[in-house]
Amino acid sequence: MTETVIPENVRVIGSGHSLASRIPWTLIVLIFACTVPWIGSRYNTFLAEQIAIDALFAVSLNLLLGTTGLVSFGHVAYFGVGAYVCGILMKTYELPFAVAFPAAGLGTALFALVSGFFCVRLIKLYFAMLTLAFSQIVWAIAYKWNDVTGGDQGLPEIPFPNLDWMSSIPGLGSLRINDQFYLLSIFLIAVSLAVLHRIVRSPFGRVLTTIRDNPERAAFIGVNVRAYQLAAFVVAGTFAGFAGALYGIFSRGVFADYVFWSKSAEVMIMTILGGMDYFWGPPVGALAIVWLNQEVTDYTEYWPFVLGVILVGLLFAFPGGIVGALGDALTMPPRYRAFLFAFQGRVSRRQYWRKWWVPSGVVTLVVSVVAASTGWFGLGLALAYSVLLLWAGTVVLVKRLHDSSQSGWLVLAVYAPALLIQYALGQHNVGFVLWLTLLVMQIAPFIVVGCLPSTSGDNRFGPASLSSATMTA
Amino acid sequence: MLEISGISKSFAGFRAVSDVSFAVDTRQIMAIIGPNGAGKSTLFNLITGHLQPDTGTVRLDGRDITGAAPYRICGMGIGRSFQRTNIFARLTVFENLQAAYLVHNGRGLNFWSRADGFYREETTALLHSIGLEGQEKTVAGTLSYGNQKQLELGLALASDPAMLLLDEPTAGMSAGETHDTIRLIEKIASERALTLLFTEHDMDVVFSIAQKIAVLHQGRLIADGRPEEVRADPEVRRVYLGEH
Amino acid sequence: MAPSFLFGQFMGGLTTAMFLFLIASGLSLVFGIMRVINFAHGSFYMIGAYLAWQIVHWVHPGGVGFWVAAIGAASGVALMGAVIERLFFRSLYGREELYQLLFTYALVLILGDAAKFLWGTQQLSVSTPAVLAGSVQIFGSTQPLYNLFIMAIGPAIAFGGWLVLNRSGVGRMVRAAQMDREMLDSLGANVGTIYTGMFVFSSFLAGLSGALVTPIQSIVPGMDVLIIVQAFIVVVIGGMGSFWGTFWGSVIYGEVLSFGILIFPGFSLFSVFALMAVILIVRPWGLFGRPL
């Protein structure tokens, strides 16, 4: 009875000493972010600030989700409290930013302390529901308390902070106030992220991960689990509050629907899409969602549908999120490398469909969207990707043939119809029905290969893979 | 060192543990045995604060610790391993043990320094003493079952306990592994002058190292004393004759 | 405050309650078995409403058409539920609950836009079936017949559901699956089929309630989100997985809303969520639920 049981969410992350990890990514991104007002349009700056604020919001959520294992569905409440406190202090009471901003953090921290105290006493499911309840309470108050929050009209026209001092810095004097505020936000967000990074890597952060992995065990190495969870809750809430405060000024107003629960869902999707096992996952997720949103809403009003599909793809094909998938690709544990690029061995039916077609389909879709909207860079990306796709696809086909004890050279027979038909189509025009038939004829060989029976036991190409032995379809 | 008196616990009318009393002396090695469902794990949970007893007290060196929170009991010098392996699956072996050191030494509230730098020597030493050298960077969830049990033991030891409660430390092990594990436990217990209280199914194990044995049956203590006495006890033989 | 007025408010609250009960019972059922909050339950409700409208449109409106539409819509949604459960949900069972929750949320997004795509954004409505049109006078207040019909259906389903769950062989299996899935599996029972069956039944209930609400409420985008929040609150108050809990939770919610508006007009929104929070703090498993 010495089986190894690997829990589902244990990801063996590649050793990270590849070339990719030696490049100072964060520094590059930071410098790039700072130059946007000069090299980009107003719209670019607007997008960049949106991404930065969402990144901070998502990272703060990940302190709960990825580091401590607390699933909060009401994180937007803290974002909202921060936004309202800062907005009210600056607009109604005309206090300077230097006072309003820290006050927003303080106010949010207090609210997080009180709400968190009740939330952490509950187990997982009820915890999630109570966070949701508190967040809706905040929303209801924001929506109804006309005197203070402006009710359903909200607080429009929050003033920019006084940034005259910025104009005295060489080079920054010529910027519009929006851009100056942008740089201030980037600075504040960068500092916040640095602090959060420190916290996650600290002994405190380490203890949080023990709570995430095994709260019972954590208690029995001496951890007062509730106290630590509450502390994490307050820290996460505070930084969400900072993000909210910046957002209120950035979007020139604070409104009740900032606090609606769908925003909690959105930030959670960002976090998981980017990869909740990695500190920089959520910012990547924020970038992806904001950018995709912008691209998609240009073409269609059905952004929720697209978001839903992305989420499904994420859950089924890429549980590690973008960073996880990238990490796997770049560090490429040997068996992935062998799977995709080595011609020896066999590929079972299940592997063919689940491990090749689904992920490559998703990735191709994403690359196509990216390539279609980014000019020359996109063209180069598309070209490079096509080469990789062709190579890996051929390898997988060959090995699938091997699995059925067929010669790998038959792959030529798989490609031949497609090549011939494409050539012929290039010369002639055809009606829709004929075109459809030809399309089916081109695709059919790939499907046939995928359905070929797996030879049980070893054959001349190698041992039967585990999944072909347990195949049901 | 540890004194249990009159402990009872019922779940919805079912008496899991019924008026159990016994004592463990300092540096003693004591085993609790009994058929399945006798209430051994429940008893452990009652001692370590995971459950609140309905009646009775638990005293550690005279101090009443009945129903205290698990993290406090750990802080008082009791370490525990669990029957179903309970480790931090997503952390590496090194990080698992290091976390225990961090908490035990009160560094848990350090928000600022890098966690990696603390207690490296102690962690490495502990790794070696439980037989996991070379596995520092292995993610704990991917360890073999036997290695996970060793890590389990290491976690219990990292808090520098005076007393160890081990819940079925050799469950699921082959004869060879059982032997190695028991030798390891014995060695560690004598090196660190530990008091040991453990539950077991394997009678060979029990009779080879226990200095005192308590027998539980349907939640009640039916025998308590030296191995020879327990082996000869008529009620114990009656209860076990069907089992063995 | 004339007694007839109060009675009217009471009946109004009861109607709301019974509608909610129809929906929330499905939600509670799925949670009781599968430990998953199905956010998409509201979407199933909405699709049920749209389907009912669609069927009435094709079949002859008024008269028998309505009942055909109601059953047809419920069955359509049940079928949809079956497909979703078998193709997608199944693969998520072993994984973290968070993934299951997020999947149901993805469904909300997808189904919401699908409905918008298929039926547009204007309000649609279905007329009350002729046999239930009209109203009665009870204690001086006018009660539409249709409302009374709904008030009768609610307890009927509750009682029927309770009977099945507690008295039949099928119900026993379901309750066993609720307690220990793995054990049931190893005993040879087809747990997968039980889960699918439960999900299908719950979808049927959702679709049915959506269809039945059409004479009273207009069908409009966003009704999925509105209803799921309310169903959620009801299930929290009453307790997950308990038919009677959901029943009484609905009644409490319906009456609190109905009379709360009289006392604190501005606060009803806030008070509902506050009630939910209080219950979760004081007795998380609801009035009739059992501690998890």
Image: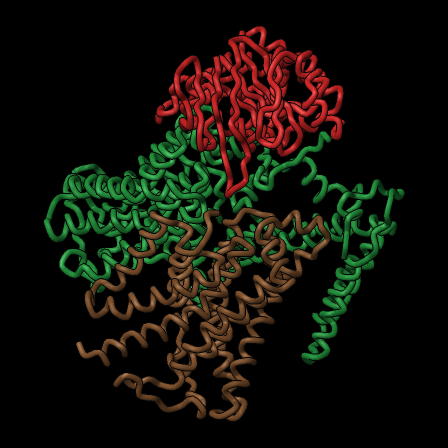
Chain colours: A green, B red, C brown
Q: Residue at x 18, y 54 (%)?
A: A158
A17 and C126: which is toward the camera: C126
* Residue that protrudes farthest toward the front in the picture: B234
* Quarter occupied by residue C251: bottom left
Q: Is residue A194 visible?
A: no
* Residue that protrudes farthest toward the left in the picture: A93
- Place of residue A375 in the rendered image (x, y in percent of width and height, measured from the top left): 49, 56
- Place of residue A444 in the rendered image (x, y in percent of width and height, measured from the top left): 76, 65
Q: Is residue C20 left or right of residue A164?
A: right
Q: Is residue B68 left or right of residue A310?
A: left
* Quarter occupied by residue A172: top left
Tell me the quadrant of the picture where the N terminus of chain C can be found. Answer: bottom left
- Place of residue A428 in the rendered image (x, y in percent of width and height, measured from the top left): 71, 75
Q: Residue at x 66, y 36 (%)?
A: A5
- Place of residue C58 in the rendered image (x, y in percent of width and height, measured from the top left): 53, 89
Q: Is residue C127 left or right of residue B237?
A: left
Up/down of A301 relative to C98, above or below: below
Q: Residue at x 75, y 48 (%)?
A: A395
Q: Is residue A317 visible?
A: yes
Up/down of A369 relative to A38, above or below: below
Q: Residue at x 24, y 40 (%)?
A: A110
A414 and A134: which is toward the camera: A134
Q: How many marks?
A: 0
A173 and C65: which is toward the camera: C65
* Quarter occupied by residue B82: top right
Up/down of B81 relative to B194, above or below: below
